Image: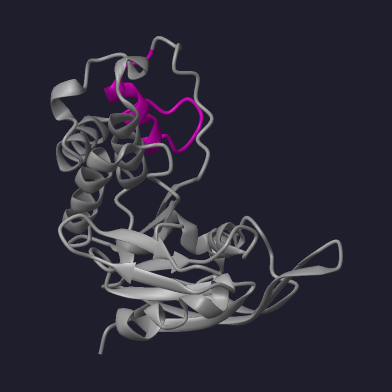
Amino acid sequence: MTEEIVGLKNIWVYYNDIPILEDVTLSIKQTDFLAIIGPNGGGKTTLLKVILGLIKPDSGEIEVFGESPREGRRLIGYLPQYTHFDLNFPISVFDVVMMGRYKQKFKRYSKKDHEITLDALETVGMLEFKDRQIGRLSGGQIQRVFVARAIVREPKLLLLDEPTASIDPEMQKVFYEMLLELKKKMAIVLVTHDTSVVSTYVDEIACLNRRLFYHGKLEGGIGMLEEIYKCPIEVLAHGTPHRVLKTH
């Protein structure tokens, strides 16, 4: 039986007395490639922050690798929706990724840190750009560098919040194919608005609009899209997958 690495049970989160997450129960396994979909304001980013221990639930139980979220997050790599980074700052791709190995003040990077950084860059297909200034990369390349920085900690779970929002369609395909390779080494949870992605790349889907409408295999989740988006939806995939909203 596949081991559970994250377990949430009856999670409630409020903001100014308004529920952001309502009675959410979710289990993430060590082999999952899970997409979390839902409308804006549906609580997707909040859910990731609960797993990371950045937001404490108002009620409910959560375990991350058998520990509290604050303790278990050392085994998590995280790429937030908005990465604040000065692209004009004169820093190389290698040094950006190496920052992910930083653990405490005044500790020098070791030979192992250098080796793991190079391995992470190779994994995301950016090793040849290791000496390039970060601001000279395309949007898709920058996202791959940030993924390298997230996995350089050697996590067992990778959380990605809308990672392809600013990437052109062709680079999105390259990005998702890279995730398929990473899936061999770690569990992946991907927050996305792009419902076409789920029909092509991920194994499971969680449909979230404050409360969890569905969690499981794709076939059942696709049928729940109309309920969570409150409008009729068709998802088609032939060659390049895309999304169609019916007249409503």
Magenta segment range? 91-109
Q: Considering the image in quadrants, where does the C terminus appear?
A: bottom right
- Residue furthest right as drawn: 17
> Residue 240 in the image: x percent, y percent?
20, 54
Picture layout, residue 84 above or below residue 30: above
Most foreground residue, 174 or 111: 174
> Residue 124 in the image: x percent, y percent?
20, 40
How many numbered callouts?
A: 0
> Residue 205 in the image: x percent, y percent?
38, 74
Q: Is residue 66 visible?
A: no
Residue at the (44%, 82%) spot, across then down: 215
Picture layout, residue 188 above or below residue 109: below
Quadrant location of residue 227? Answer: bottom right
Whether residue 174 sits left or right of residue 97 in the image: it is left
- Residue furthest front as drawn: 247
Q: Is residue 96 visible?
A: yes
Most foreground residue, 177 or 13: 177
Whether residue 14 sits left or right of residue 16 in the image: it is left
Residue at the (86%, 61%) spot, across then down: 16
Say if the magenta span includes residue 104. yes
Most foreground residue, 102 or 149: 149
Q: Considering the image in quadrants, where does the N terminus appear?
A: bottom left
Residue at the (30%, 21%) spot, across then down: 137
Residue at the (40%, 46%) spot, across then down: 163
> Residue 58 in the image: x percent, y percent?
75, 72
Whether residue 127 sits left or right of residue 50 in the image: it is left
Colouring used for the render: one colour
Picture layout, residue 182 above or below residue 168: below
